[in-house]
Image: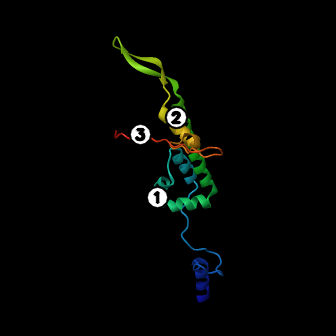
Amino acid sequence: MSIIFKLKLKTVMPAKKGNKYAQGNKGGRRSNFKQEYCEQAYKLTLLGATDKELADFFHVKEQTVNNWKKRHKEFFESLKRGKELADSSVANRLYQRALGFEHDSEEIKVVDGMVERVPIRKIYAPDTTAAIFWLKNRQPAKWRDKQDVNVEGEGLTPTVIILPSNNR
């Protein structure tokens, strides 16, 4: 009976860390990852959720989310797809704001005591802040606030200008 008990312990108990002769169970806690997390994570990242916010949603630590990304390719791919689609949507909206845009809409008005829906066309002027932001991120060497100008070169000599003092 003691032989059977020892065999059960050997197959159930995790091996100590660093034991190169250990077989079977690698030890550690079993993952609480579920396949449905892929779809949930995809939808959350479409809404702009960060890895920290995903961890809060799944009631785990952020490191666990990172481990899931390494161990479950489909989870990693769903996060990647969701984040890329959300980012591209924001970039598209920023681009539209930078250039200006227009769209059809309607206003609700009361005319002679009657409520009417009146179709209108809304026009938004280009937004210079959005344009600057876009250019600084797309072409940082050209559009950053600080420009490096090289004034040294072959055949150039420095010019010294002496300005008169204000004490006359």
Q: Quadrant of residue 167?
A: top left
Quadrant occupied by the N terminus: bottom right
How far is mark 3 from mark 2, CA to CA?
Answer: 44 Å
Q: Check disc 2 and report the residue beneath it.
A: 131
Q: Quadrant of residue 151?
A: top right
| Type of the residue with mark 1 | His
Q: Which mark is residue 164?
A: 3
Q: Earlier in the sequence, mark 3 or mark 1?
A: 1
Kindly tell me whether residue 20 is visible in this rendering. Answer: yes
Quadrant occupied by the C terminus: top left
Q: Depth-wise, is mark 3 or mark 2 nearer the camera?
A: 3
Q: Depth-wise, is mark 1 or mark 2 nearer the camera?
A: 2
Q: Which mark is residue 59?
A: 1
Q: Viewer-proximal residue, 33 or 137?
A: 137
**Residue 42 point in image, percent of width and height:** 56, 48
Tag 3 near tag 1, CB within 8 Å = no
**Residue 72 point in image, percent of width and height:** 61, 58
Q: Earlier in the sequence, mark 1 or mark 2?
A: 1
Q: Depth-wise, is mark 3 or mark 1 nearer the camera?
A: 3
Tag 1 near tag 2, CB within 8 Å = no
Q: Secondary structure at mark 2?
A: helix
User: Which residue appears at 58% of the width and 55% of the height?
Assistant: 35
**Residue 121 point in image, percent of width and height:** 49, 20
User: Which residue appears at 55% of the width and 60% of the height?
Assistant: 66
Q: Which mark is residue 29?
A: none
**Residue 123 point in image, percent of width and height:** 49, 23
Q: Viewer-proximal residue, 147 or 30?
A: 147
Q: Secondary structure at mark 1?
A: loop
| Type of the residue with mark 3 | Pro
Q: Is residue 101 left or right of residue 153?
A: left
User: Which residue appears at 54% of the width and 29% of the height?
Assistant: 99
Kindly tell me whether residue 1 is visible in this rendering. Answer: no
